[in-house]
C-alpha cells in the first residue's frame, strides 16, 4: 500500500484492545445479575410469582366437574385435550381460605416433574424478570403454615411479589389424592 492510503496499524490494534477490555468489563458487571422469569398472578390483593419455566399455559376457566369428597383446595377436574387435570385453588394452601370462583378467573397449568395441575388464580398480570440477588426472605412469622411454599419476595417500587416454590407445592401430601385410602375409609 502506498503511504497516502496506509493504515495506522498500531492505532487500530490499540483501539481493538481497548474495545476488547471494555466489553469484558461490561460482561463482568452484568454477570452477577441472574434474572429468572416469573408469571405474575394475583389471588385477592396479593401478587404471586410462579416460575415461568414450570408454567405450560394460561386458560379461561372451563366448565369444571366437581368430584365429591375432595379436599377444599381441589375445585374439580376438567379435560385438557383429552387429559384429565385437577384444578387447585392456591389460596387454602397459602392459608388464605378458599376463593369464590368467578367466570373471569384463569387457570395456570403448571408442571413439576411428572405432576401437573391447573392453579386457579384471579388475574394473570404477565411475565416479569426477577433479579435473584434482590430476592428477600420472608420476615419471621410471615406466611405461617405456608412458609415451605414461599421461595421469597421481590420488592420493586413498593410492589411486593411473593415468589411461590412450585416444587414445594407439588410435593405436599395434600396434592396427591390416594384413591385406595379413600376407598378403605369408606368401607
Image (cartoon, rainbow, N blue to C red):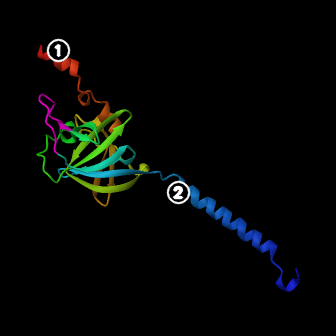
Location of mark 1 (residue): 184
Horizontal and vertical percent position of residue 180: 22, 18
Location of mark 2 (residue): 30
Q: Which residues are magenta?
A: 63-77
Say whether residue 76 is magenta: yes
Q: Determine the residue positioned at 11% across, 30% down.
A: 68
Quarter-of-image position of residue 18:
bottom right
Say whether residue 6 is magenta: no
Q: Determine the residue positioned at 16% across, 41% down.
A: 64
Mark 2 or mark 1: name the one nearer the start of the chain. Answer: 2
Q: Nearer the viewer, mark 2 or mark 1?
A: 1
Does residue 92 appear left or right of residue 115 in this picture? left
- Is residue 4 at least partly visible in the picture? yes
Quarter-of-image position of residue 168:
top left
Q: Determine the residue positioned at 14% across, 52% down.
A: 103
Does residue 30 appear left or right of residue 134 in this picture? right
Q: Which mark is residue 96?
A: none
Circle 1 Cα neighbour tier, 10 Å, few/some/many (<14 / 14–19 / ≥20): few
Horizontal and vertical percent position of residue 129: 39, 55
Amino acid at each position: 500500500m502506498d503511504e497516502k492510503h496506509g493504515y495506522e496499524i498500531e492505532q487500530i490494534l490499540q483501539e481493538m484492545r481497548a474495545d476488547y477490555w471494555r466489553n469484558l468489563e461490561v460482561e463482568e458487571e452484568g454477570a452477577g445479575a441472574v434474572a429468572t422469569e416469573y408469571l405474575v398472578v394475583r389471588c385477592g390483593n396479593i401478587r404471586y410469582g410462579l416460575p415461568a419455566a414450570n408454567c405450560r399455559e394460561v386458560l379461561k376457566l372451563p366448565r369444571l366437574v366437581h368430584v365429591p369428597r375432595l379436599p377444599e383446595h381441589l375445585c374439580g377436574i376438567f379435560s385438557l385435550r383429552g387429559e384429565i387435570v385437577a384444578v387447585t385453588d392456591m389460596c387454602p394452601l397459602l392459608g388464605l381460605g378458599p376463593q369464590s370462583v368467578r367466570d373471569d378467573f384463569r387457570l395456570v397449568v403448571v408442571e413439576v416433574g411428572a405432576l401437573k395441575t391447573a392453579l386457579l388464580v384471579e388475574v394473570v398480570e404477565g411475565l416479569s424478570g426477577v433479579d435473584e440477588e434482590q430476592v428477600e426472605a420472608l420476615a419471621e412469622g410471615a406466611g405461617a403454615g405456608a412458609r415451605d411454599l414461599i421461595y421469597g419476595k421481590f420488592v420493586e417500587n413498593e410492589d411486593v411479589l411473593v415468589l411461590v416454590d412450585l416444587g414445594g407445592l407439588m410435593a405436599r401430601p395434600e396434592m396427591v389424592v390416594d384413591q385406595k385410602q379413600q376407598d378403605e375409609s369408606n368401607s
